[in-house]
Amino acid sequence: MKYIFMDEKGPQNRFKISNPFDEVKKLSYGDDNMHVYVADAIMIDDDYMENLYKEYSLLEEQYMKKRQDIGELKASKILKGKRFRYGIASLKKNDFKFYDQLFDLLRKYKVENLSFSISKAALVVDSRLNDWILVISEITGVSALRLKYILAKYVEIECSEEVVSKLLDKSVKLADVLESIKKDLDNIIENNLYNARMEKQISVYWQLHQLIKITNYEYVDDLEPATKAVFNWEKVVFPMDLWLLEKENSEIHPQISLYLDEGIPKEPFTRLGFGNVVENNDSSSTIGLRLSDMLVVFIGKYLSQLSADIRYDMKKTNELKHLPDKWFYLNEEQFALVKKVYNYVLGDGMYSYGLDTFFDDGVLFEGYLRYISKYENYSKYTDEKNHSKNFTKQLISEMRGRFKEAYRNEMAAIMEYGSLKNAIEEGVFHPL
């Protein structure tokens, strides 16, 4: 028997425009300001559970002796504010010791892990434009994945208040939404004609502009997805299904019980054939959820803070942005912990770390771990003096690799099923 415990960070079921409009946020987010939804699921074998729980309870007890003022131990309290501003590089001694021993315990007791992230801007695009993307892709041969990525990034970073408002308003016809996007792209292109940093991006936006221009508005309103701008749980279930198939080599999982944290609905997961699915679990009485909480907040904060620090300034769009050097100020123990995190989060299978079609934040975190872990030892790491710029070069290369892999998978699906739409409807390709 095995048990899965799942927790989340940045949950948000419905979306609305920021008020007053914020050019950086675009959407109205919760107190945690998460632009992405992050979930983490751990799978524990019954043979190891008792000893794991005993050792983890002892680890909690030892940590709480140093911080008796925080009540129930939650990752959000350990990693609050400056204590985790630059990730592991900012960890205080006791916080570091806790997480270092935590990852050792997870390895010792063979705890399997699944982490995945979903862009909230992409979910807004889903609610209006996915059907149009699939149709225009079939008509023109343009990659649907590439088109979805471009639109999600545009909504996340550069689109106007008018476009966000119309995307969220189902009373506005889809043709009017596309026309607003086209006009907004006109302005962005015109304002950045001589911006060398934006040259490739402007070229991409021009291609998007032309695709909208050739769209026949007489039929486009028939492509309106039925859903409103709400959270799509299929984007959570699909990566979990892949992960389980990789681990269990079975399409049904009757020997697994799934325990969901409060707020995560049971119904979307029932199709996976678990022996039991239990919702509304309380972490205070469920140690498995406390373990998952420690991971999801850790990863979620990394994603959010790395993304915020590398996002270019909208008022200085001609300046290339690098991660601040403080992300790379690691002592030897911190360097070793980054490598532990890399080996645990990314090293246990192809589907243990899942990304959405718009994958920037996830690839940024993955790339950061991979960049530091490629150094054989701490001495070689400290010999390098240009980590920030070297990381940017690696990240660009990895992004290109992601695109190539996505295109290969898309073409394989089209060859097998006739269209990407068919492959998605058959459940063999992830939701756009």
Image (spheres, rainbow, N blue to C red):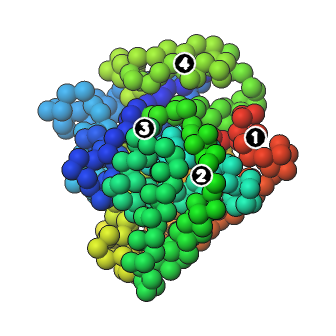
Q: Check contact, mark 2 vs mark 4: CB within 8 A.
A: no
- Rounded to the nearest whole Å, what is the CA distance between mark 3 and mark 1? 30 Å
Q: Check contact, mark 2 vs mark 1: CB within 8 A.
A: no
**Residue matched to label 1:** 423
Q: Nearer the viewer, mark 2 or mark 4?
A: 2
- Rounded to the nearest whole Å, what is the CA distance between mark 4 and mark 1? 23 Å
Could you classify mark 1 by the number of other residues whose Cα lies within 10 Å: few (under 14), some (14-19), or many (20 or more)?
Answer: many
Q: Looking at numbered disc 3 in the image, what kind of residue is underneath it?
A: Ser
If you read the primary sequence from the N terminus, does the residue marked by circle 3 or circle 4 appear first? 3
Q: Residue 380 in the image: x percent, y percent? A: 49, 75
Say whether residue 212 is left or right of residue 302: right
| Residue at image point 31% right, 59% down | 24
Q: Quadrant of residue 160?
A: bottom left
- Rounded to the nearest whole Å, what is the CA distance between mark 2 and mark 1? 26 Å
- Does dot 1 land on a helix, a strand or a loop? helix
Number of numbered discs present?
4
| Residue at image point 58% right, 23% down | 269
Q: Check contact, mark 3 vs mark 1: CB within 8 A.
A: no
- Rounded to the nearest whole Å, what is the CA distance between mark 3 and mark 2? 16 Å
If you read the primary sequence from the N terminus, does the residue marked by circle 3 or circle 1 appear first? 3
Residue 249 visible in the shown view: yes
**Residue matched to label 4:** 267
Q: Looking at numbered disc 1 in the image, what kind of residue is underneath it?
A: Ala
Say whether residue 79 is left or right of residue 257: left
